[in-house]
Image (cartoon, rainbow, N blue to C red):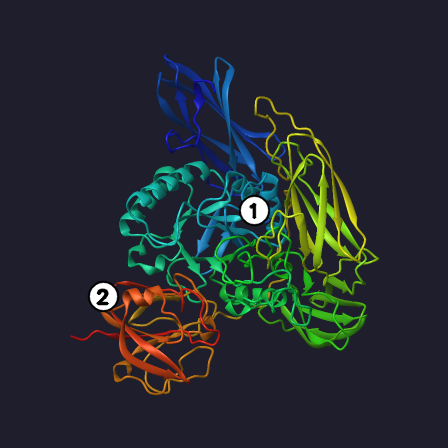
Amino acid sequence: MDPLHVTLPLYDNLETVGTYVYTDNTSEKSADVTVEAEIQNEYSQNKNLTLVTQIVDNDGAVVAQSFKDVAIPSGQKLKVATTTNVQNPQLWYTRNPYMYKVVTGIKESDKVVDTYESPLGIRNFEFNKDTGFSINGEHVKLHGWGQKPTNAWVGLGAALPDWLRDFTFKLMDDAGGNFIRWGHCAGSPAEVDMGDKYGFVTLMPGVSGESEDEGETWDIRYKAFKDLIVYYRNHPSIFIWEGGNWAESEAHYKEILNAIETFDPKGKRLMGNRRADVKNDSDGYVSIEIGTEGWEREYPDLPIIESEYNREESPRRIWDKYSPDDNFWNHPNISKNTYKLSSEEFAVRQADHWWNKMGKKPYHSGGANWVFSDGPHGGRCPTEVTRASGEVDAVRLPKEAFYALKAMWRPEPQVHIVGHWNYTPETKKTIYVISNCASVKLYVNDKLIGTNNAPENGYVFKFDQVAWETGEIKAEAFIDSELKTTQTKETAGEPEALKLTPITGPKGWLADGSDIALIDIEVVDAQGRRCPLAKGRVDFTISGPAIWRGGYNSGNPNSTNNLYLDIEAGINRVAVRSTLEAGNVTITATKAGILDANLELNSMAFEIKNGLTTMLPQVYENVLSKEPLPAHTPEMPKYVPGIKNRSELFKKFSYTGDGKAMLRTNMHWGKKAYTDLEYNYTVLPKFLNGAEYVRTPNSDNRYWARDQLQFIAGKKMHIYVLHDDTVSRPEFLLQDYNDTGDNVNMAGVSMSVFHRLAEEGESIIMAGNSDGDAPENCRMYTVMAKKFKK
């Protein structure tokens, strides 16, 4: 690097900020682009230079440029700003994310001594509390995923070549995603670039855990937040800075906003904290509500975006209850699962979660399904070796839920029949078809089964008691009575052979010691069709310059990195890593009773000198394509909030479990206890009469979240928790509450009454019913409150 140079955006240690690019007066006719460049002169003499700024379009043409003469003293850093105008700019949309680049150069005596490139996307946007999100005047419903920035991959961990991270992004794009929330620290530079090029509105966090931090921990977080802003502030995909994964103190909010005002004063981005509603300190500081499984907005004067909805889990390997089991229903830990969902149920419930929480609400900007890929991050199902909340599994093989969301979210007409067509004779079952069209016709062997023009939850077309016949099942989707798209699924024959299919990066498999080749292993019939019910062990051999990394089985511990693997739902996937030696690699797969498969792979020579290379990491290029507007949007009923979760005592109430909770007043005998059970309170201790109370969902009796139920005490108040005596007391109950010695009989179940006193304005947070296993038929706790009287 020349001693006279544009600095790098590395604020920590170096305390340099690089370039800052922002736009003003943006329209389809023109846009002003301002570039602030920090220049450092490490020479011992003063320097005169010319700062050259060029705006380069996606085809490599310079569409605008500016020149500015600058004098900079020796040993000094200087910020220099230039503004240029782009005529008729291509605007950055989620459905057409057009990217420019800004080339900032330093010329001294007509010699270019340094250049620096910055990304540029030209766009206007608004998050509106009444109408949701719009970009460049075009309304867009945001839908996508939360994703861990490690992007962990079975057998590989987080040591992924960039093209594999791009592989995941392409899948999200293919499924119709346009929104991502990284949790709970920033995505990698490569992935932020991918957000730019695929058009993903990004909710970008700094570094945060599951609580407010103090002291040295907060200092580290705050430094990381400043570094994040400086490094990523030029990326057009970032629309919201997330201050933290939990509410902060007023002092911390002031620091967060100061960092944004210092380093991104012209970015027009919003700032919010997930669970900001747990503290009154948040009021006046957050500019967008970041919800969590919320059914009611907590800040009616702010726009809202969802950060984590649908935490349910289901493995890819189990189709439905009409298909053979594969170590799920008969798993020894099935009774301990919070979720006992088949792949079919998991897919169909995607529409319920999306439509009722966000999709049908005109004011809601949209949100992030938690998460996209299965991984090692806090699952609630002991039958699984991962958290199985993903729409793809831990090697990125799609579940039925992936195709369900694709059929809901892609703008083009879509239709997907959930499941397979390989049942036993006499099977009659409900067939679910997911479509973004207005009506669907279903056929079995070309015989019309029915027509459905009244989807549930916006997208679910249900056909009851469909009798299975060998052959094919077909769905046709219509808009305004016009056929738009079809899907057919066939009955596969008996397993005949294994099939191996390689997947490599766009430039091939590179012998750089870190590149990966993926190999799909399928069981196919005589016609080459995948056998959807196939399972069982496959053994592999490998020879040549490569390192076997293998795959996994979702219900079997210690199944990674082995030279054997079970097929799940007809397919599985393994990985091999290249070495520094190029050459041919041979892989053989065998399975008892069917034909073997062989695959030849060639790793390509890769130039490395002194441990370095001039070749940038490979990613998918030339991905820009303009998508159409949505072909059809389900009819949205005029939004009626229903029963508002508001009360005098339970302020800013929220519930993040899977079911619905609601607030009620005037407790007495005969009142219903749960939202999903027909059980009433009968004999109550007198001190509970007249209380306000929370009607919880009993279906969450084995669900756990740290912030499952929370509110701010509206008055100084008594809080009572009724807890099932057959369940181990959770930590929050033992730590903050005292057993009153009273009990309530709830339909034959004894529930102890616990009590604490809360001051007005105090944040109250309750976790799950148990911190560990709970009996299968136990009761969920309920909560009551009464105003304190002297």
In the rendering, at what x and y percent does residue 425 appear? 77, 75
SS class, disc 1: loop
Determine the residue positioned at 36% across, 87% down.
682
Which residue is at the front of the view, 197 or 702?
A: 702
Residue type highlighted by circle 1 = Gly
- In the displayed structure, does residue 554 sit left or right of residue 425? left
SS class, disc 2: loop
Residue 6 image-quadrant placement: top left
User: Which one is earlier in the sequence, the residue at label 2 or at label 1?
Assistant: 1
Query: Residue 199: which numbered mark, if any?
Result: 1
In this view, which residue lies farthest toward the right? 526
In the rendering, at what x and y percent does residue 738 appear? 26, 71
- In the displayed structure, does residue 766 sit left or right of residue 151? left
- Name the residue tied to disc 2: 759
In the rendering, at what x and y percent does residue 470 appear? 80, 70
Q: Residues within 10 Å of mark 2 (few under 14, many from 20)?
A: some
- In the displayed structure, does residue 259 sit left or right of residue 762? right
Q: Residues within 10 Å of mark 1 (few under 14, many from 20)?
A: many
Query: What distance separates the C-alpha of mark 2 from that of mark 1?
Result: 46 Å
Residue type highlighted by circle 2 = Glu
Residue 614 image-quadrant placement: top right
Determine the residue positioned at 44% across, 49% down.
184
Determine the residue positioned at 68% across, 36% down.
509
**Can residue 310 be seen here?**
no
- In the displayed structure, does residue 424 sit left or right of residue 168? right
Name the mark nearer the viewer: 2 or 1. Answer: 2
Q: Looking at the image, is 781 positioned above or below residue 710?
A: below
**Can residue 770 be seen here?**
yes
Do tag 2 and tag 1 residues touch (Cβ < 8 Å)? no
Query: Residue 282: which numbered mark, if any?
Result: none
In the rendering, at what x and y percent does residue 73 appear? 35, 17
